[in-house]
Image: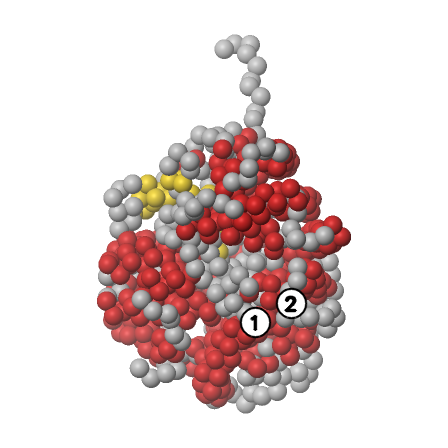
């Protein structure tokens, strides 16, 4: 109407989204909305806290444990709503302003969480319910126990002095974890290897050259620019004949966080180890690992070391043979690369390797290069042979089609669902009967504001509200796969297909969830169980029946030849023992940090080299560091938990053996896997869930047989 004033804009977090499936309205969210929503969410949480602790009625499960469901409009979910969006985007699509806001809000949010967990009146109500409650369902019992233990493990039984100290420790740890991640991202993005001499591209596949040319073009540079992002770094280290350039790339990658600049993570790592140790000891545990493992399948430090030592004993002899075979491929005096490449490392120059730091015939920047040559010699196959058959769009069809074949679910891309970046695709997911199951976001390629690696997360969990409505999840897959170029679509390696399958396994765990309570739904399971669904899916990557569904040449449409599939299967266990020891070494490093009983004052780099020595079969460099870029154990929630990958690998090999016996697409077996594991979340003990699926506990035998360590 003429003369009417425009309506005042409302913060989108403050009202129902009114979007399809109530998805986050990324197209309406502005930077200034976050802080306002955070502060209002905290205020509303405090209002609910006051209502709960001042309730004159006797504490019950319904009025104390699950009273957040009282408000039909989700009034008290505001803080969770804004936190979920903000922190997911902080990893997937950040910028300087987001980073600054995270630094500002992190201590405020940690303080608020402490205010809730350390409130004596609230804990007393929870304790009374824990001691005296109505007859509960198994899922209600699980929730009550988790709630009570959550308070205890957050310091509810401490005296005032202990609680005050715990507040200080947790707030500092939260801020340092955030700073660690921000430093790592900056270090990763600060490096580039700029090449202007085409001769220095020798050995590189055309796909890597094209991607580097596109990167240079986007930066306004001539020639070719290589970065530390995985789709660029891995091919360069595998194929480049320029040994000096491989060294420079390797050193840049493996010195992140130890340069003399503002992004140095050495002191942060040392402090995080000490903060977590002190938190655990304040709560009555000898070490942080004891604290963590008391709520894990492994149960104890001894249980973790039992697994890691078993793996070292089983795989180390084979790994030594692999290394001996690899060394035969290395010339006695590898030629140096020609000079001429320029390094742009705005933080600091890469640390140079001291002369003679590594003995033997092979340096670490040679491993991928000569491994590729050995694999080509033995099996006549490499990643580039497969790329033309692994077009991303077709791989998506194949992975989604696998879920359709196993579980009957279907995927429909919907461009009307808002996304946070043009790269992101949004899908509606429908169950076998056609009913709506979930929303799935897929974010495939690296970019400036995105952390490296791959992960699954959620923008909305699954639960059943008081009205009986099954609120379905909004799941997101975030990866850093090879990007398309102006001349070619995104063509993947088989390893990238495995990454996709891995994260998609997490997504299925989230999408199939059918639990009453959100805190028990989806991937909210014990940490050493969470990798089972993801690692299980990786098994399909080398199955001929699966590859036949999507692996077609992007230009000719010809299917992946049988001979190449045969080579894939034959080469599956190439360097498998070395890869296993690498993972075990990370687990040993993790445990070494978090089994500290006294103040940790050791030099990080020297400590690291000693901590994982048992799983190392090559001389180590004294000028590289894994710890300062080890996000999993410093900032990613896997502290005292990195062993979980190998723990779950035992489970996934054992579970896939069941599928192999019945047929890898057997829908009856798949339905049992869905019903017993994927849909149950954390509603029961993980071993109980697993035994419900298989009928018995897992053993390490299936893994040893799959890897060729033990004869079948």
- Rendered image quadrant of residue 182: bottom right
Q: Is residue 325 left or right of residue 223?
A: left
- Rendered image quadrant of residue 654: bottom left
Quadrant containing the C terminus is: bottom left
The residue drawn where x is 38% and y is 60% is: 689
Q: Position of residue 613 (x, y in %)?
A: 60, 81
The correct choice, above or below, for 416 with respect to 243 in the image is above
The correct choice, above or below, for 643 with respect to 375 in the image is above
The correct choice, above or below, for 160 with respect to 494 in the image is above
Q: Is residue 43 left or right of residue 307?
A: right
The residue drawn where x is 24% and y is 58% is: 667
How busy is the neighbourhood of tag 1: few (under 14 within 10 Å), some, or many (20 plus)? some
The residues bearing labels 2 and 1 have C-alpha atoms spaced at a distance of 10 Å
Q: Where is residue 340 in the image (x, y as percent from the top left)?
A: 62, 70
In this rendered view, identify the residue nearer to me: 229 or 129: 129
Q: Residue furthest top?
A: 2
* Disc 1 target residue: 301
* Disc 2 target residue: 287
In this rendered view, identify the residue nearer to me: 678 or 608: 678
In this rendered view, identify the residue nearer to me: 133 or 599: 133
Q: Earlier in the sequence, mark 2 or mark 1?
A: 2
The residue drawn where x is 38% and y is 74% is: 699
Q: Are marks 2 and 1 in contact (CB under 8 Å)?
A: yes
Q: What element carries label 2?
A: loop
How busy is the neighbourhood of tag 2: few (under 14 within 10 Å), some, or many (20 plus)? many
Q: In this view, does 299 lie to the left or right of 489?
A: right
Q: Is mark 1 on a helix, strand or loop?
A: helix
Q: Where is residue 80 in the image (x, y as percent from the top left)?
A: 55, 41
Q: Where is residue 136 in the image (x, y as percent from the top left)?
A: 43, 47
The correct choice, above or below, for 41 with respect to 379 in the image is above
């Amino acid at each position: 109407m003429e003369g009417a004033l425009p309506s005042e804009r409302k913060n989108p977090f403050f009202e129902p989204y009114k979007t399809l499936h109530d998805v986050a309205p990324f197209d309406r969210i502005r930077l200034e909305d976050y802080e306002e929503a955070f502060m209002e969410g905290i205020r509303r949480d405090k209002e609910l806290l006051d209502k709960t602790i001042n309730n004159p009625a006797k504490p019950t499960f319904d009025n104390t444990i699950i009273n957040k469901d009282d408000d039909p409009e989700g009034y008290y979910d505001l803080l969770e709503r804004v936190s979920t969006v903000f922190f997911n985007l902080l990893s997937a699509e950040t910028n300087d302003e987001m980073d600054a806001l995270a630094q500002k809000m992190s201590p405020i949010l940690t303080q608020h969480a402490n205010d809730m967990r350390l409130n004596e009146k609230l804990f007393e109500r929870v304790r009374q319910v824990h001691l005296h409650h109505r007859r509960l369902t198994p899922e209600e019992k699980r929730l009550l126990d988790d709630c009570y233990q959550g308070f205890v493990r957050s310091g509810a039984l401490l005296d005032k002095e202990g609680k005050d100290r715990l507040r200080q420790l947790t707030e500092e740890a939260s801020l340092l974890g955030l700073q660690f991640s921000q430093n790592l991202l900056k270090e990763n993005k600060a490096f580039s290897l700029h090449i202007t001499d085409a001769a220095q591209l020798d050995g590189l596949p055309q796909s890597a050259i094209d991607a580097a040319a596109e990167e240079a073009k986007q930066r306004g540079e001539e020639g070719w620019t290589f970065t530390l992002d995985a789709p660029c770094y891995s091919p360069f280290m595998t194929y480049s004949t320029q040994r000096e350039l491989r060294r420079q790339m390797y050193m840049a990658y493996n010195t992140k966080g130890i340069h003399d600049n503002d992004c140095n993570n050495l002191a942060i790592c040392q402090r995080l180890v000490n903060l977590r140790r002190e938190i655990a000891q304040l709560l009555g545990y000898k070490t942080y690992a004891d604290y963590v493992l008391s709520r894990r399948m492994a149960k104890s430090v001894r249980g973790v070391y039992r697994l890691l030592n078993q793996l070292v004993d089983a795989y180390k002899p084979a790994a030594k043979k692999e290394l001996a075979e690899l060394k035969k491929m290395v010339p006695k005096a590898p030629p140096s690369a020609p000079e001429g490449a320029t390094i742009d490392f705005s933080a600091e120059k890469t640390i140079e390797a001291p002369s003679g730091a590594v003995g033997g015939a092979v340096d670490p920047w040679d491993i991928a290069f000569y491994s590729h040559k050995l694999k080509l010699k033995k099996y006549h196959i490499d990643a580039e042979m497969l790329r033309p058959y692994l077009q991303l769009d077709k791989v998506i069809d194949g992975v989604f089609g696998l879920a359709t074949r196993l579980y009957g679910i279907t995927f429909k891309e919907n461009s009307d669902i808002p996304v946070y970046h043009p790269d992101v695709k949004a899908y509606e997911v429908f169950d076998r009967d056609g009913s709506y199951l979930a929303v799935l976001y897929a974010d495939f390629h690296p970019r400036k504001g995105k952390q490296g690696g791959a992960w699954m997360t959620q923008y909305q969990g699954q639960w059943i509200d008081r009205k009986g409505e099954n609120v379905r999840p909004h799941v997101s897959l975030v990866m850093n796969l090879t990007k398309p170029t102006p001349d070619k679509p995104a063509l993947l390696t088989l390893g990238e297909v495995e990454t996709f399958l891995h994260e998609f396994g997490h997504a299925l765990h989230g999408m199939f969830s059918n639990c009453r309570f959100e805190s028990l739904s989806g991937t909210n399971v014990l940490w050493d169980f969470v990798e089972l669904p993801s690692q299980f899916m990786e098994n399909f990557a080398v199955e001929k029946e699966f590859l036949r569904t999507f692996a077609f040449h992007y230009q000719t449409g010809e299917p992946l030849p049988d001979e190449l599939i045969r080579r894939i299967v034959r080469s599956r266990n190439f360097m498998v023992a070395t890869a296993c020891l690498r993972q075990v070494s990370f687990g040993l490093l993790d445990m070494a940090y978090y089994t500290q009983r006294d103040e940790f004052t050791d030099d990080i780099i020297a400590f690291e080299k000693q901590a994982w020595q048992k799983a190392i079969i090559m001389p180590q460099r004294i000028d590289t560091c894994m710890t300062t870029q080890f996000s999993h154990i410093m900032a990613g929630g896997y502290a005292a938990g990195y062993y979980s990958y190998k723990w779950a690998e035992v489970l996934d090999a054992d579970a896939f053996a069941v599928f192999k016996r019945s047929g890898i697409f057997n829908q009856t077996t798949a339905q049992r896997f869905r019903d017993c594991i994927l849909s149950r979340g954390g509603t029961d003990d993980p071993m109980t869930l697993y035994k419900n699926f298989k009928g018995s506990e897992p053993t390490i035998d299936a893994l040893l047989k799959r890897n060729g360590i033990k004869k079948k």
